[in-house]
Image (tube, grey):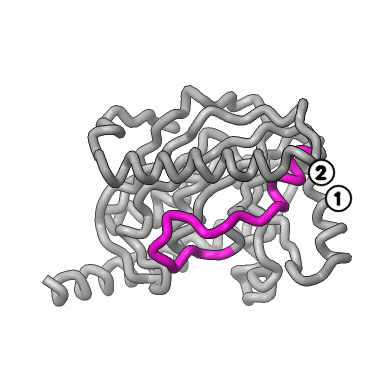
Amino acid sequence: MKAVRKIWALFGAVIFIVTILVFAPMVVLFKIIGGKPQEWFIKKSYYYIPRILFTPCFITFETYGLDNIDINEKYIIVSNHKSLLDIFANPACSPFPFKFLAKDEIRRIPFVGWVASNFCVFVKRRDKISRGIVLTHLKEALANGTSILVYPEGTRNRSEKPLLPFYDGAFRLAIETGTPIAIQTLLNTDNFNAADKALDLHPGKVKCSWSPPIDTSALTIDDLPFLKERVTRIMIEELESYHSEKTSHPDTSISLK
């Protein structure tokens, strides 16, 4: 069984790399064109890129709770982070585009950083000046109607715990801007891509759940610990419900086309 899994992982890695190489020229073209065509391409990319990349690997996406989300609203989206597959699952399971809050190290990766600049706001986590500038950019993005996705754990969770402790940043931003928090829980991405193995891909159906958003308009900074604990509890309940009773998420997925 291990041999079969290794062969499939190798097949998935090859398919993934080949697809990236085929798709890369399109990214470059629209980046150069800019303007409305680039905006259109970015919007479509959120739905289609993950499917173009992973359908040949027999990885599909299924989403629950979309009726909780208003596609005309802007959100601070918080999501758990267990696998490298998450950065594709988040947009694949979202009914609207958004920007990731990402580590500055990604921007320094040749080509990858250039492409990621279309989809990310970068921050140097240990640089207070950088964090201040990024906060200003995030507030501007929200004011322009762009949602922001943050991994409040700050890094991939390689532990056996369902979640790592959350940082304050996403919740502080939500309170300061009065932006509702949308909770996107990735239920099983680590089944198809291990936290410490970038291209170890395995076939299956990635499942994601959207919980009802949390209104922050009446909250103050004193409510931050409560808000953080509430989101933590909601995510843990979603994960525990999925893993203990798979029937809690029946096969009634909603198409995002």
Q: Main secondary structure of the magenta part?
A: loop
Which of the 4 image quadrants contains residue 239?
A: top left
Q: Where 180 sits versus 76, above or below?
A: above
C-alpha gap between disc 2 and disc 1: 5 Å
Determine the secondary structure under disc 1: helix
Q: Position of residue 125 (x, y in %)?
A: 73, 67
Q: Nearer the viewer, residue 15 or 180?
A: 180
* Amino acid bearing label 2: Lys
Magenta segment includes 169 = yes
Farthest residue, direction left:
1
Q: Position of residue 23 (x, y in %)?
A: 48, 60
In the picture of the structure, the residue carrying the numbered disc 2 is: 139
* Count of residue discs: 2
Q: What residue is pinned by disc 1?
A: 136
- Name the residue: 72% across, 56% down: 121
Residue 45 visible in the picture: no
Q: Residue at x 42, y 40 (%)?
A: 237
Is 63 above or below relative to 205? above
Residue 219 in sight in this render: yes
Q: Is 145 left or right of 140, judged from the image as shown?
A: left
Residue 84 screen position, x and y as percent: 46, 63
Helix, strand or loop at mark 2: helix
Label 2 Cα neighbours within 10 Å, binned few <14 / some 14-19 / many ≥20: some
The magenta region covers: 155-175
| Whole-percent x, y for residue 13 in the image | 34, 70
Quadrant position of residue 98: top right
Residue shown at 48% from the left, 63% from the top: 157
Q: Nearer the viewer, residue 79 or 45?
A: 79
- Answer few, some or many: residues within 10 Å of disc 1's Cα (few below 14, many 20 plus, some between 14 and 19): few
